[in-house]
Amino acid sequence: MLTDEEKSEIAEELAQAERREQACVEALLAVQKRRGWVSDENLAEIALLLGMTPAELDAVATFYSFVFRKPVGRHVITLCDSMVCWSLGLNPLYEHLKARMGITYGETTKDNRFTLLPASCMGACDRAPVMMIDNDLYGPVEPGAIEGILRKYT
Amino acid sequence: MERPLTKNIRPGQEPLSLVEYEQAGGYLALRKALTSMSPKDVQDAVKASGLRGRGGAGFPTGMKWSFVPLGEHAPKQKYFIVNADEMEPGTFKDRLLLEGDPNLLVEGVILAAYAIQADRAYIFLRQGYTLAAKRLRRAIAEAYAKNYLGKGILGTGYNLDLRLHTSAGRYICGEETALINALEGRRATPRAKPPFPQVSGLWGKPTVVNNVETVMNISPIIANGAEWFKSLSRSVDGGTKVYGVSGRVKRPGAWELPMGTTLRELIEERAGGMQEGFRLRGIIPGGASTDVLLPEHLDVKMDFDSVGKAGSRLGTGTAIVLDDHTCPVGFVHNLEQFFRRESCGWCTPCREGLAWIEQTLRAIESGAGEMSDLDMLAGQCRLLGPGNTFCALAPGAVEPLQSALKYFREDFVRHIKGKKCPWK
Ligand SMILES: Cc1cc2nc3c(=O)[nH]c(=O)nc-3n(C[C@H](O)[C@H](O)[C@H](O)COP(=O)(O)O)c2cc1C
Ligand code: SF4
Ligand code: FES
């Protein structure tokens, strides 16, 4: 069940939209912001508010890399795996994170603290290699600096 | 040297507030346009400046606007959209502009929307640009508070609403018709053209989509005129350009310079040259979907025609350097992995062709390639070329591949004959 807070944020987005379905990405993200991901049950409820069928909404939701339709950890780490970051040290960074956390791309640590994902260019190629944790951008990231960065996310 | 796009940007500091922006001469152009120029006058001023789109294709901006039907019989509802989806590997110029001077973008939006008589505008911002989103929200709110947006702008009869949409991460959303579908709340696959968006765009209404950097040029052009704009440039295309360099250079970054600055000046002077111990092997001049150039092309001027004559495209004007310690096959494989992942899957040649290309490059890189793969790849480059796919993603994807096959053929052959990557 969506909370009242979620429903009212979606209502605010709907009030500004020209047509109801226009607010669909905003609505999905409003729910994801609070729960980390969007479950089938939540998706169906959002679809109802937007006047879409669940299938229509899921066609949009699954199209985007950053609408999560499966549970994720408390924090999501994304590594840019596009060309500039790849050529400036993505692999050592990835190997370090993998060994440190015992997970590969798409997995979540056992304590549910981190999910690790690859991502396309983050538009910060001048700072390659680049990593994001939730909404925070880091770059250039040296493997040695990772420990200090991770400590900020509990 | 004048830097109309970045003059207000103070690295590492907050952007100017609306009041500071006004003190620096901001919103004078809007005042001038709304009080003494017709929409057609604004269009003509932009046309005369010769401004060409900075989103990659270089389409003349004034001409694009002129396709929008105006006058009594035109549809009343029209839209202006800023394309801030910047997701092409190697491209980070719009981030600098959005974070650095959001007011200049908002003023440009109002001028452009006025020129095509749109009463609603959108900024379509990519996922992950959270700082840009925060600063844009503030600039928009301040513009509403001062009645630069909203009803009866500056006491005239002109009304405009501006909304920020933040996307959720997919490169194809930058293609303008896919972007329009995304804004309507649909799956962001591209649309057939014609009809072009200027005639039938968002919900079938006339719509113009322009790149962030394009829009930021509008206010300076209205304020200072076409001749001034042309005089900024070192080539036939007017204005300045925000160029960038990334890869193994000493000082990667982005700089506003006269249009027509050479690759040599960008790489050797601005970016400080290659890092110690690394040599330059190749350059992708304008984002991942442009053909590779070689060190022999360093004296090419970075303007639309000159880069075209050298066999590539200016694209977004942000160059990526390939160094001699990086495997060129791995480099191209990484690129095609991006395009394969980001293909929207709508049309068969792109969906299947990019997958085939990516797997073949992976095989060659790991030592399992065959000589016949090179002909197959060259054939795919033709099959995915212009005219064979639904949108320009696929033709863009094969540009760096076709030139890598030409310029780095011996590296491909060494992988195949030696059955391993010589860089590993
Ligand atoms: C796959 C693909 C991605 C694109 N991404 C962007 C983008 O992120 N930003 C952009 O301004 N233009 C992008 N474009 C180009 C747009 O379709 C369009 O030409 C441009 O926004 C027009 O603006 P301009 O005339 O000001 O250059 C992309 C095109 C394609 C085919
Ligand atoms: S070329 Fe690729 S991205 Fe463009 S419509 Fe076809 S499948 Fe989609
Ligand atoms: S390639 Fe990693 S941020 Fe652009």
Image (cartoon, coloured by chain):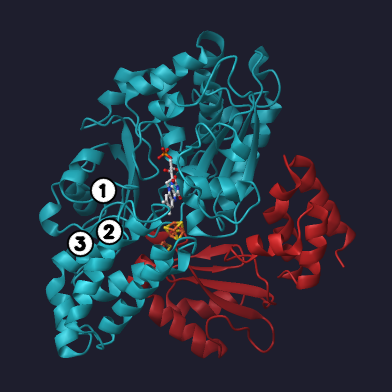
Chain colours: A red, B cyan
In the picture, residue B130 is in which quadrant?
A: bottom right
Q: Secondary structure at mark 2?
A: helix
Q: Residue B27, percent across and down?
A: 54, 23
From what the image shows, is residue B88 above or below residue A39?
above
Placement of B144 over or under B330, stated as above or below: above
At x 60% / y 14%, what residue is drawn?
A: B72
What's the residue type where badge 3 is placed? Ser
Mark 2 touches mark 1? (CB < 8 Å): yes
Indicate yes or no: mark 2 CB to ligand 1 under 8 Å: no
Quarter of the image that includes the N terminus of chain B = top left
CA neighbours of label 2 inside 10 A, class few (<14), some (14 to 19), many (20+): many
Mark 3 or mark 1, which has the lower sequence index?
1
Mark sitting on residue A42: none
Q: Secondary structure at mark 3?
A: helix
Gap in Å between the C-alphas at discs 2 and 1? 9 Å
Residue position marked by numbered label 1 in the rendering:
B313
Residue occupied by mark 3: B403
Describe residue B194's horizontal placement relative to residue A101 as left or right: left
Please rate how many residues cluster around mark 1, counting C-alpha atoms within 10 Å: few if below 14, some from 14 to 19, many from 20.
many
- In depth, the one of B234 and B334 nearer the eye is B334
Disc number placed over residue B399 in the picture, else none:
2
Q: Is disc 2 in the same subunit as disc 1?
A: yes
Quadrant including the C terminus of chain B: bottom left
